[in-house]
Image (cartoon, helix red, strand yellow):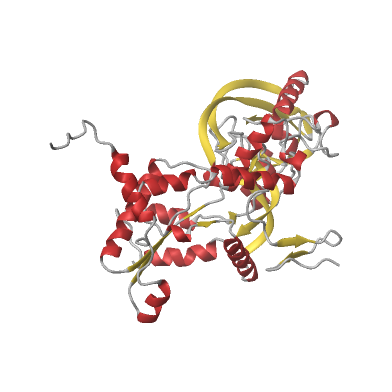
């Protein structure tokens, strides 16, 4: 009697035996081996998998990308190439640290309660327990990687390679430590990249504040701002050089409300005369546009926030605001401005707000010491490659986007204030402040 066909297709009945056969054979390894291929000149083809986060699960983007790579590697394998699809997973610094910190919160603990070493033990334990899900999913998809070569970005060999590359780039002058404005996440207490900041339109307010003229206190400039708390770090008021309303005030000074500091009125073409009153407060240490204006005009940079976005305890800050959370400081400052007759009006205002994609905290532009890669020397050959036709864009109009990006590219902040991940191989002398960057840990006296 012939067997009845099942009414529904059961993929596991087909896939599992095939997958087991693949995984227990060496069909996905290079044939011949890499060593033999190099000796004999046998054609080779290799893809390094863009490593997914070890703590994650596959999504449609992974499935699409890995399917395309699988097609390429299988085609070359059938053409007789010695093929290698190198698998691995990423330690996912911020994502993994956040997961473990949330676990600790449920126990009433923080990473600081544990200390670095104990905290890292917890992270490694969690990684070993939960970190294999995405690899199992990749295998179930039938990804024809050489699984005998699986790597993790914190493996000893890769950690040595990261240190070696860092030191080389430092020796070549392509990596440096400097103080610049960065995206700061006050929940994670670390700098994050532009790609990790999500900008969304949110409802807020425009506060119109009166800045009295220093030599004529009965007169004032009215400045509109979405962030009145940052006025504690104001160093100037800017107007457009062709704005007839304010030309006669350029070069004079105003009194910073609630603080009493004298600050100049400057002219800069970046100012939009149509925004607010056409007068803008300049806070170089807490706004990216203001930072560039401050650099152009040689203005001081006054940092008013701690890493947790509280007002710093410093002499230039009125005592009653020191230590306040930024939003509590906002409420106090607005109330005090109103009480002193310096608040002209408040209007509803919808504007773009940047939030960290992991913590969802409002990002604070912060002036901090970080490590950067000089990007322009690296961008120049990449620009030439497209200009000379060695790389083509399909469709061609994307080349314009590429050039716009590459010609305006900024130095890349590569340091993070995390405990989980690669540590920058730099040591700081507590006595003299000298920095040592080295391949090996320096010996202590």
Residue at 65%, 31% (x, y): give it. 227
Q: With 369 as the anchor, is 85 left or right in this view? A: left
Q: With 135 as the anchor, is 107 left or right in this view? A: right
- Number of numbered labels in the structure image: 0
Up-down relation of residue 199 to residue 288 (above or below): above
Q: Quadrant of residue 84?
A: bottom left
Task: List x then y, in percent, for residue 288.
Answer: 61, 44
Up-down relation of residue 398 to residue 364 (above or below): below
Q: Nearer the viewer, residue 80 or 406?
A: 80
Q: With 79 as the anchor, is 286 left or right in this view? A: right
Q: Nearer the viewer, residue 427 or 36?
A: 36
Task: List x then y, in percent, for residue 323.
Answer: 80, 32
Residue at 27%, 61% (x, y): give it. 75
The reply to whether residue 293 is visible in this rendering is: no
The residue positioned farthest toward the top in the image shown: 339
The reply to whether residue 33 is visible in this rendering is: yes
The residue positioned farthest toward the bottom in the image shown: 39
Task: List x then y, in percent, for residue 343.
Answer: 70, 22
Quarter of the picture holding the N terminus: top left
Q: Nearer the viewer, residue 308 or 143?
A: 143
Q: Nearer the viewer, residue 399 or 134?
A: 134
Q: Quadrant of residue 229?
A: top right
The residue positioned farthest toward the front in the image shown: 1
Up-down relation of residue 438 to residue 272 (above or below): below
Task: List x then y, in percent, for residue 445.
Answer: 86, 67
The residue positioned farthest toward the left in the image shown: 1
Q: With 72 as the anchor, is 406 left or right in this view? A: right
């Amino acid at each position: 009697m012939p067997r009845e066909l099942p009414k529904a297709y059961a993929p596991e009945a087909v896939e599992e035996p095939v997958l087991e056969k693949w995984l227990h054979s060496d069909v996905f390894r290079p044939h011949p081996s890499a060593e033999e291929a190099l000796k004999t000149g046998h054609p080779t083809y290799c893809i390094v998998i863009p490593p997914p986060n070890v703590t994650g699960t596959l999504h449609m983007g992974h499935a699409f990308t890995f399917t395309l790579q699988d097609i390429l590697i299988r085609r070359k394998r059938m053409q007789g190439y010695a093929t290698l699809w190198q698998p691995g997973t990423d330690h996912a610094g911020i994502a993994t640290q956040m997961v473990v910190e949330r676990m600790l919160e449920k126990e009433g603990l923080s990473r600081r309660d544990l200390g670095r070493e104990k905290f890292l033990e917890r992270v490694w334990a969690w990684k070993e327990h939960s970190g294999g899900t995405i690899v199992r999913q990749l295998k179930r998809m039938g990804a024809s990687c050489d699984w005998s070569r699986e790597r993790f970005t914190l493996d000893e060999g890769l950690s040595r390679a990261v240190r070696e590359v860092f030191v080389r780039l430092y020796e070549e002058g392509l990596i440096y430590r400097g103080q610049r404005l960065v995206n700061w996440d006050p929940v994670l207490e670390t700098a994050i990249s532009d790609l990790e900041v999500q900008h969304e339109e949110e409802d807020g307010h425009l506060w119109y504040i009166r800045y009295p003229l220093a030599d004529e206190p009965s007169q004032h400039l009215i400045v509109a701002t979405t962030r009145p708390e940052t006025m504690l770090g104001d160093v100037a008021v800017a107007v457009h050089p062709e704005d007839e309303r304010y030309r006669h005030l350029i070069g004079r000074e105003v009194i910073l409300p609630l603080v009493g500091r004298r600050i100049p009125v400057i002219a800069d073409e970046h100012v939009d005369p149509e925004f607010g009153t056409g007068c803008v407060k300049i806070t170089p240490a807490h706004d990216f546009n203001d930072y560039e204006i401050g650099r152009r005009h040689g203005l001081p940079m006054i940092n008013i926030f701690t890493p947790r976005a509280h007002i710093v305890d410093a002499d230039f800050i009125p005592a009653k605001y020191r230590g306040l959370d930024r939003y509590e400081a906002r409420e106090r400052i607005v109330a005090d401005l109103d009480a002193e007759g310096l608040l002209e009006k408040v209007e509803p205002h919808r504007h773009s707000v940047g939030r960290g994609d992991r913590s969802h905290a409002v990002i604070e532009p912060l002036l901090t010491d970080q490590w950067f890669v000089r990007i322009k020397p690296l961008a120049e050959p990449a620009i030439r490659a497209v200009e000379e036709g060695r790389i083509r864009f399909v469709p061609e109009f994307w080349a314009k986007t590429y050039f716009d990006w590459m010609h305006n590219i900024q130095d890349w902040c590569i340091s993070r204030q995390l405990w989980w991940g690669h540590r920058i191989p730099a040591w700081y002398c507590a006595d003299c402040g000298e920095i040592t960057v080295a391949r090996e840990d320096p010996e202590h006296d």
